[in-house]
Image (cartoon, helix red, strand yellow):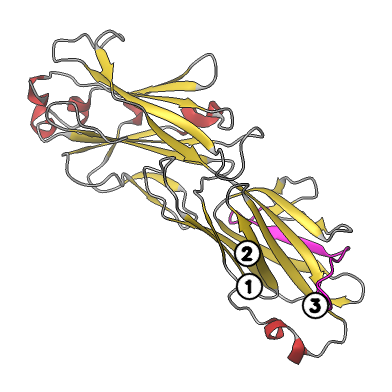
Amino acid sequence: AGLTAYDTYTVRFVDTMSAGLDPSKVAASMRVYVAAGADGGFDAVSAGKDGRAGTEPAKGWTDITAQCATKVAADGKTFTVRTGDLIAALGGADAFTAGARVVAVYNAPLNSACNHGIAKGNPNEVYLRYPRSPFADQSGDAGFTHTPSDDACAYTWDLALTKRGSDGDKPLAGAVLSIADDRGRTLAADGTWDAEGKATVTTGEDGRVTVSGVDSGKLEVRELKAPKGYTAFEDTRSVTVKAEGLDVDQVAAAKPKLTITAESPLRADSADGSTGSLEASLINTPTGTPPSITTGGFMPSTGDMAMYAAAAAAVAGAALIVVALLVKRGGGSHKE
């Protein structure tokens, strides 16, 4: 009969996560927004410079989180988000006649069991439950039917940074580094992130420092102490991991391009999207080497090379899931 026949209209999102995704922060982070009309996009909130979604609704959107209920199943894998009455949320039947768009935004952190790289990824499966008819009882499950399931997949990477000498590219031990992420945290020796930004790491005999669970974004590297017989570089240099081709759907079939670049004297070496392994080097020159034969005189520049891999990205530690619903006349069309 079309949406005009409904006195109330409630929908539910149902999401089932794989073992690599942790729903423990879902309920606390859940935000739900609604906008009138079936035409238009799903940008209910704006994203900051770090790519993370905000909470303030964009123009034309209304935050209806207080009217919604989030329930995590006993198995800890599946959760349900039930909206309040969308007709009432939009201010009455006249606004709902043109249809409605609903967006749910929540955090699902990656955990220690997550897969790295694109070979498996960390999928989740979501579908929408909606009223069977204007006469169905929406107080229980019997009055609802559901759409086919849609899949999304979260990905993460590992970055190995190797300290090397310009005299033969040999690995160097004993370099003390400060490696900071876009939140100002610095990497500690045990692989965790220090929120105060005071932790440092020291290269071992293989010259390597490994950062596990890297997001798309930029890592800032400072050399606090060079290995004996070598000269430390000044100021800060960055390693950037960038994923292009992602959109709000972030479906498992997406094949965006992953790029790693580095500022000299850092060097991008390789990227394996299947395993999620990224390699970069930090080059030191022997003490007393004339600047004229160093890499660019240690002036900041675009990395020596850019490495690409077919891959998709997610927020490691906080994989942001966005589910969007398009409600049209007839009640059957949707976008998840």
36 horizontally vs 242: left or right: left
36 horizontally vs 214: left or right: left
Calculate the distance from the C-alpha at mark 1 to the C-alpha at mark 3: 16 Å
Q: Position of residue 301 (x, y in %)?
A: 60, 78
Residue 32 in the magenta stretch? The answer is no
Q: Residue furthest right?
A: 228
Which image quadrant for residue 208? Answer: bottom right
- Badge 1 density bin: few <14, some 14–19, many ≥20, Cα 10 Å: many
The label shown at residue 166 is 3
Residue at the (26%, 14%) spot, across then down: 144
Q: What residue does disc 2 label? A: 239
- Badge 2 density bin: few <14, some 14–19, many ≥20, Cα 10 Å: many
**Mark found first going from the N terminus, 2 or 3:** 3
Q: Relative to the observer, which residue lies in front, 21 or 83?
A: 21
Q: What residue does disc 1 label? A: 263
- The quarter of the rendered structure image containing the C terminus is top left
- Badge 3 density bin: few <14, some 14–19, many ≥20, Cα 10 Å: some
Task: Give the residue type at disc 2.
Answer: Val
Question: Would you place residue 291 above or below residue 321 in this image?
Answer: below
Residue 168 in the magenta stretch? The answer is yes
Which image quadrant for residue 8? Answer: top left
Task: Give the residue type at disc 1.
Answer: Glu
Query: What is the span of residues highlighted in magenta in the rendered image?
Result: 165-185
Q: Are marks 1 and 3 in contact (CB under 8 Å)?
A: no
